[in-house]
Image: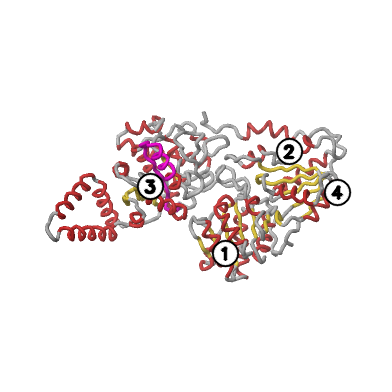
Amino acid sequence: MTQLLERINSPADLKRLSLGELNQLAKEIRTVLIETVAKNGGHLAPNLGVVELTLALHLVFDSPRDRLIWDVGHQSYIHKLLTGRRETFSTLRQYQGLSGFPKQRESEHDVFETGHSSTSISAAVGMALARDLKREKHHVVAIIGDGALTGGMAFEALNYAGHLHTNLIVVLNDNEMSIASNVGALSSYLTKMRTDPMYFKGKEEVESLLRRIPAIGPTMVKLAEKLKDTLKYLVVPGMIFEELGFTYLGPIDGHNLASMKSVLQNAKATSGPVLIHVLTKKGKGYPPAETNPDKFHGIGPFDVGTGQSIKKNAPPTYTQVFGETLIRLARDDERLLAVTAAMPDGTGLNGFARQFPQRFFDVGIAEQHAVTMSAGLARDGFRPVVAIYSTFLQRAYDQVLHDVCLQKLPVVFAIDRAGLVGEDGATHQGLFDLAYLRHIPNMVVMAPKDENELQHMLKTAVGYDGPIAIRYPRGTGVGVQLEEKLRNLPIGQAELLCDGTDITILAVGPLVYTALEAANRLREQGVKVAVVNVRFIKPLDEELILRLARQTKHLVTLEEHVLAGGFGSAVLELLARKQHSEVKVINLGIPDEFVEHGPIEVLRTQYGLTPEGIVATIRQQWPLRVGPWTKPRSPHWAKERADLHAIVAPAEGRK
């Protein structure tokens, strides 16, 4: 039953509810969250933990006039439910449905788009400055988790906000720290005193009275101030924020609506920057998520009754193969270390951490630090393997270039979630790593066609005496057998899978299998196609590529990556440098746009990265010019286009 939720069409509707009704609404919201994420997948535990906090924020502040900025943004599901998107909430993370992150095109209440961590305070400072410059009066609130606060950018922003002394509210959602009840109660009491206008008035009157006492008055004032500050340091756990120039309020119970409403109202009345420390329980209200918050942080479809993921029998994931292979290699090489930035499970390093705890380092959400720390480890004889998602490694570009590659240090970059990632959308698609890595001197870049080749590439990487990166996709492998014996691959050597005289397809990563299927369909039409598993994006196998270019005069490059600066660009640069202007080239990949969320299969169809799409593009751009193309056009492409609507049919309940 969601009787109360059905009456909420905007935050203004909350203000008409009693405290009891608000608590009932919180229960209804949790039910909707669990049922929707069980069907669609998503970030369940973070959202269950901020139900009351989100309600309190919308009760006290006037969105969108007041700016609410969600750090990372994966905990904004309740915010979406309360801001006019209740009826379309069933489309969450579905193709052309609601995004799992804030999106300005969805609602005026999504004032800043997020997806990576530690950015909210910086954005809030900018909006607060804009407000002041325009002489407006609204409030600016950044909501940031304790995990995101480990990012250095967050502290840079806190430091500058304290320096500005402008009105700004930071809500710290702490779902990890455990604080004893007596300390919490005392801190809450001091918070109430310090935010009560009568307290400030009384304090000023006492100081004025003390100063009038002959001879000893000023000394007594100083002593009182010193004693007050000493007590604060002893009992208030937020002095680091006070030293940065913030008024610290908390910690408060993040599941107590009345308490939070009161503190938020006091924060609105306090001049200067304020930090509110809120204690919440990740996964609150759903026992499986409370017990395993990491598992339910981001999860695919699951059974509500048991909490078990709904998975079909499938090959191991690339992530699993990476983690297991690294353990095998580490048993024989004590120099091998594993480094991650708050993603030990997501990058497949949990097993390594258990077996080699002294050789595993989780630095928190601090990708820049992870890379430069690894450079230091490599400088003194170790072989660190830095496992980071493609989209998150973007944050450490300068460290990769300056601290690793400039010094040609043997750091291995295991780049997970490279290519299309699906339902997490634009902020998480791993479509830029080839472009930001291949132009850096000393860097080697590899991409395996399948999970078996991944393990050989990792073996190759840890033995290479310089910077080297392996990019591999999200999800399961293609189902090939994993060879027991690991071997080194010759650096820069591609793999010719089949020869041909009419067209050459040069494919990167798992799209090699897509290329093979496209080649088979073209052969049925009388076109002789060569297919190359590129393996090395840098250095290229120039000899093989140039031989096939002269042989077939037609090259197709295929990559799950942006076309600008990617693998196809590298091939064009090679042909230009060698003055092969007679060779015709088609570059297939992602055009100059951000890719929104949706099933990976649908997105590949949208961008022509399917066998049908490849064949159709070739036939369109090179009609009747290559081979004896006498057979009629293959019907597969048209059929897939016709079936696309069925693939992405509106989810149940979509309006």
Q: What residue type is labelled 1?
A: Ala
Select label 3 or label 1 by which is in front. Answer: 1
* Residue neighbourhood size for the residue with mark 4, other residues' Cα within 10 Å, grouped as few (<14), some (14–19), many (≥20): some
Q: Tell me where the magenta segment starts and ends, as one range.
A: 125-148
Q: Is residue 142 magenta?
A: yes
Q: Residue 375 carries which label?
A: 1
* The N terminus lies in quadrant: top left
Q: Which residue is drawn at 41% across and 30% down?
A: 9
Out of 138 and 149, give the one closest to the viewer.
138
Query: How far is disc 1 from disc 2 in space, using C-alphas?
Result: 44 Å
Query: How far is disc 3 from disc 4 in space, using C-alphas?
Result: 63 Å
Q: Is mark 3 on a helix, strand or loop?
A: strand
Q: In this view, does 552 lie to the left or right of 38?
A: right
Sequence-wise first label, 2 or 3: 3
What residue does disc 2 label?
Answer: 612
Q: What residue type is labelled 4?
A: Gln
Residue 24 appears in the rendering: no
Q: Does the magenta stretch include residue 609?
A: no
